[in-house]
């Protein structure tokens, strides 16, 4: 997902649907390698402009990043943050940074959150 063309294929051109929902499911994987690689992929996807808005609108991306970064309950950290650990938290922070860098994405997030 480091290449723009790969991100665009997975998110914008893949049929019948985007690969984002599958990645969101992997973000919560109990297997550390799966969770870490999913976070890396989502961070890379949110780094590319055309894909960023699709990621912001995808159910679960924003909620998963916020859940991983929440630090209110250390006792349940392994359950709520998944197996990705510190690497997952770094990648989730990168996702939020990428999403926040684009004013158009902020509008998508506000619209999606307002519709709930």
Image (cartoon, rainbow, N blue to C red):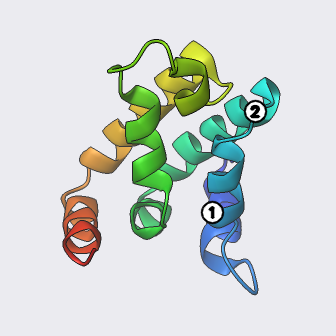
Q: Residue at x 22, y 74 (%)?
A: 111
Tell me if residue 93 can be seen: yes
Looking at the picture, tell me which residue is in the foreground, 6 or 112.
Answer: 112
Q: Is 92 placed above or below 12 here?
A: above
**Residue 73 placement (x, y as % from top left):** 39, 19
Residue 8 appears left or right of 14: left
Based on the displayed image, in which of its 4 quarters is residue 16 positioned?
A: bottom right
Asked if residue 20 is positioned above or below residue 64 in the image, the reply reads below
Snapshot quadrant of residue 27: top right
Quarter of the figure with the C terminus: bottom left
- Image coords of residue 115 (percent x, y): 24, 78
Q: CA distance from mark 1 to mark 2?
A: 18 Å
Q: Secondary structure at mark 1?
A: helix
* Residue 22 relative to residue 56: left or right: right
Quadrant in the picture for residue 56:
bottom left
> Which mark is drawn over residue 20?
1
Q: Nearer the viewer, residue 41 or 61?
A: 61
Q: Which residue is mark 2?
A: 30
**Which residue does the image show at 60% across and 17% down from the upper left?**
85
Disc 2 is placed on an element classified as loop
Q: Position of residue 11 (x, y in %)?
A: 62, 68
């Amino acid at each position: 997902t480091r290449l723009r063309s790969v991100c665009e294929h997975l998110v914008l051109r893949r049929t019948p649907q985007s690969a984002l929902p599958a990645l969101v499911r992997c973000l919560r994987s109990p297997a550390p390698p799966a969770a870490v690689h999913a976070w890396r992929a989502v961070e890379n996807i949110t780094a590319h402009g055309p894909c960023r808005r699709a990621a912001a609108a995808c159910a679960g991306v924003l909620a998963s990043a916020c859940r991983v970064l929440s630090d209110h309950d250390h006792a349940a950290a392994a359950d709520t943050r998944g197996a990705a650990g510190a690497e997952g938290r770094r990648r989730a922070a990168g996702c939020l940074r990428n999403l926040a860098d684009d004013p158009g994405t902020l509008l998508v997030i506000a619209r999606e959150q307002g519709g709930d």
